[in-house]
Amino acid sequence: MADPGTRQGVMAGWLKAILVAAAVMVGLWALLVVLAARLPPGLLKDLAGFLPACVTLVRRLRTDPRVPFKAKTALVLAGLWVLSPIDLLPEFLPVIGPLDDVVVVALALRYAARRVPREVLLEAWPGEPRLLERLIGAPATHPAEPEGQGDEPGRT
């Protein structure tokens, strides 16, 4: 055993502290995953799975040749925003902490959705399709009428 006053003893103490911290972090993440999986169906469960589903979506779209470069760039920038330690709202604030991440991801997905065919998005989305449909909007059912044509007879 190394003497606590020596350089090896100090290094061993730091190594133990780092290993304990890493084990606690992994344990907390595992607990969060189990708790999120046990949530009852509803909005809270949908929100708990939103960011992981977005990560999977970005990973799949990044390698898809049908996705334009600008859409890939927007998605990668959104991913970097989520991973960045710099936030507009600190993460430790309850409820609103991760809000800036969710907003940036939602805006990037809406931007990409306008440039990527809907079938490609739905194919790459790992979650329930209704969540993605709600985020990007329902598909257009009919083309918009040109100006000057209306339902009223006699008007031009």
Image (cartoon, rainbow, N blue to C red):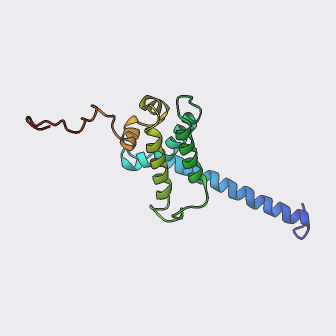
Name the image quarter holding the N terminus.
bottom right
Vertical order, 123 against 79 (above or below): above
**Left or right: residue 69 compared with residue 123:** right
- Residue 5, how many percent across, how many down? 89, 71
- Residue 26, how many percent across, how many down? 63, 51
Nearer-the-camera pick, 29 or 60: 60
Farthest residue to the bottom: give it. Answer: 5
- The residue drawn where x is 11% and y is 38% is 155
Nearer-the-camera pick, 59 or 93: 59
Name the image quarter holding the C terminus.
top left
**Residue 36, can we see it?**
no
Nearer-the-camera pick, 56 or 141: 141
Vertical order, 86 against 110 (above or below): below
Farthest residue to the left: give it. Answer: 154
**Left or right: residue 137 compared with residue 142:** right
- Residue 43, how many percent across, how many down? 37, 48
**Residue 154, can we see it?**
yes
- Residue 4, how many percent across, how many down? 87, 68
Farthest residue to the front: give it. Answer: 156
- The residue drawn where x is 54% and y is 40% is 70
Nearer-the-camera pick, 154 or 136: 154
Vertical order, 32 against 56 (above or below): below
- Tell me the quarter of the picture where residue 149 sits: top left
- The residue drawn where x is 48% and y is 46% is 108
Vertical order, 19 against 111 (above or below): below
